[in-house]
Amino acid sequence: MAEILQKDGTWTFDGDTIRIVPGRERGVHPLRQTLGELAVPLGAVAGVAFEPARKGGRLRLRLRDGSDPLTQAARGRLPEAADPYQLAVEQDRTGVAEYFVDEVRHALLLEQLPDGPTDRYLLPGPAVPLSVSAGDGTASFDGERVRLEWNWVTAEGKKSAGTRVLPVADIATVEWQPSAGLENGYLRFTVPQAPTNAPPKHDPHAIELYGFKKDPLMALVAAAVTARLPHPSAAGAARSAVAPAAAPALGLSKAPESAPPAGPAAPADHDVLLRRLRELGELRHAGILTDEEFAAAKQAVLRRF
């Protein structure tokens, strides 16, 4: 059992599941508090890293592509404070964070679990019913239908179309885009029966977002709907589920340039070594390597940790 308790939240690992409980402090992001406790199965984990900093550091959990509806919907664009798969670590708990990382990595080594894309969601997504008000409207989802309602800042033409109710069966895709610079964000639902090229401000199937703190909560609505749409692997899109530019934010497919290595190897190196061990295991099971050859090769890899 490994556990780390911080103001930001608590992470616990029992050998099979990483339980993530958000903190109750006032400064904890509302997305984390709304999402609540998460139970991440070890099979959904692609990697874990601790990034030391001047005062403490940060734990990051990297999930397998296609394993989590929230990661799928957010595509690495959640702010750090809102990302449930990151944990701010205080200076006096860095040793505990490093121990936590070692325990998870050790379990991944023993189980020799794959770290590539999944063909189904391994996490259920946010609980429903769910309702979020931000930007020019309110998005509600009860597990079967999305309801879009407008407020006083909604453009008149869009508001005149009235409340929109979209059954999940009618939704082809859902996209959450945060505000960036002078560009407003949006939560948009694509409905093939009623295609539109209108900007979010005038699109009756989109809520325009203005860059306020509650905007990331709309990603929860997107994730809850995403969990009920066909998995991206059905369209052969599991590998493209996360934009390459977002990969570092999601879990360090490569180590951040500004972060020093955690231990003898950087986070990316550990992930490479994990994959190498899995490959060696597959070669042994296929009869290509003898037990002695496998043991020797495994020790050579482990010495690099």
Image (cartoon, grey):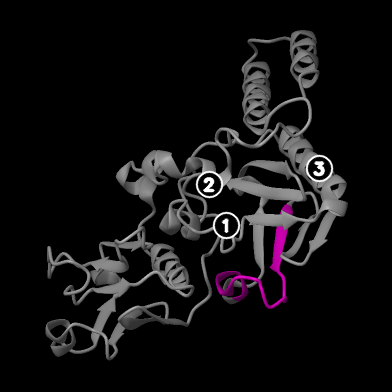
Q: Which residue is mark 1?
A: 80
**Residue 249 bears which disc, if any?**
2
* N-term-proximal mark, 3 vs 2: 3
Secondary element under disc 3, as helix, strand or loop, is helix
**Relative horizontal placement of residue 272, taking residue 296 as reference (left or right):** left
Q: How dense is the environment of label 1, judged by Cα within 10 Å: few (below 14), some, or many (20 and up)?
A: some
Q: Are marks 3 and 1 in contact (CB under 8 Å)?
A: no
Q: Quadrant of residue 148?
A: bottom left
Secondary element under disc 1, as helix, strand or loop, is loop
Q: Are marks 2 and 1 in contact (CB under 8 Å)?
A: yes
One can see residue 1 in this view: no
One can see residue 258 in this view: yes
- Chain part drawn in magenta: 17-33
**Relative horizontal placement of residue 55, taking residue 252 as reference (left or right):** right
Q: Which residue is mark 3?
A: 98
Q: Quadrant of residue 62?
A: top right
Instruction: Find the distance from the CA under tag 3 to the CA under tag 1.
Output: 20 Å
Q: Quadrant of residue 83?
A: bottom right
Secondary element under disc 2, as helix, strand or loop, is helix
Residue 160 lies, with reference to residue 280, above or below; the image says below
Q: Is residue 21 magenta?
A: yes
Q: Measuring from the top left, give residue 35's x and y in whole percent.
A: 58, 72
